[in-house]
Amino acid sequence: MRCEYISTILHASLYIVKRITKRDLTLSPQLEVVSEESTGRVDYAIKALEELLCITEGKLHQVVMGFAQNLIQCESVIQVNKKNKKRKSGEAFGEDFDYIYGIVTTASEWYFILFASDEYRARARIPSIINLL
């Protein structure tokens, strides 16, 4: 039931973003991410063509574990995007940064992460928490 709730919210959000941006975005559940350092499935991934933009980790109660998993997934996805040389975030962080958005959710609480990385360090900002219940 929780997964259906998460999926419905993500589909509705993606529909709104697609209408505003006119970009061809897709939601891929249970997407396997293979990087040099790790391999694993993300609960949901938002993609523009083959470029990963956002990954989501759904947890029933263990939000802290969800954050840890999501941050590791974000790092892996940045490596995959760098390998594919799909996107740079020049305007947001300067020419040397790559970034991805992460979401950790219990279905009623939604935490949004902006994960950025360059060759020297990785950073994560967790600016938003939204309670739906």
Image (spheres, helix red, strand yellow):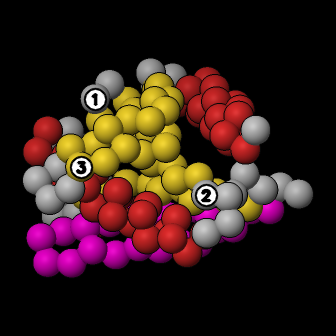
Q: Which residue is mark 2?
A: 59
Q: Amino acid at mark 3?
A: Thr
Residue pointed to by mark 3: 39
Image coordinates of residue 21 in percent, x first then y, are 53, 30
User: Magenta residues?
Assistant: 111-131
Kindly check if marks 3 and 1 are in contact, taking CB atoms under 8 A apart as contact.
no
Q: Secondary structure at mark 1?
A: loop
The front one of 69 and 55 is 69
Which of the two discs, 3 and 1, sits closer to the camera?
A: 3
The answer to which of marks 3 and 1 sits earlier in the sequence is: 3
* Prevailing secondary structure of the magenta residues: strand
- Considering the image in quadrants, where does the C terminus appear? bottom right
Image spot of residue 121 (x, y percent) = 21, 78
Circles 3, 2 touching at the beta carbon (< 8 Å):
no
Disc 2 is placed on an element classified as: loop
Label 3 packing within 10 angstroms: few (<14), some (14-19), many (20+): few
Q: Residues within 10 Å of mark 2 (few under 14, many from 20)?
A: some
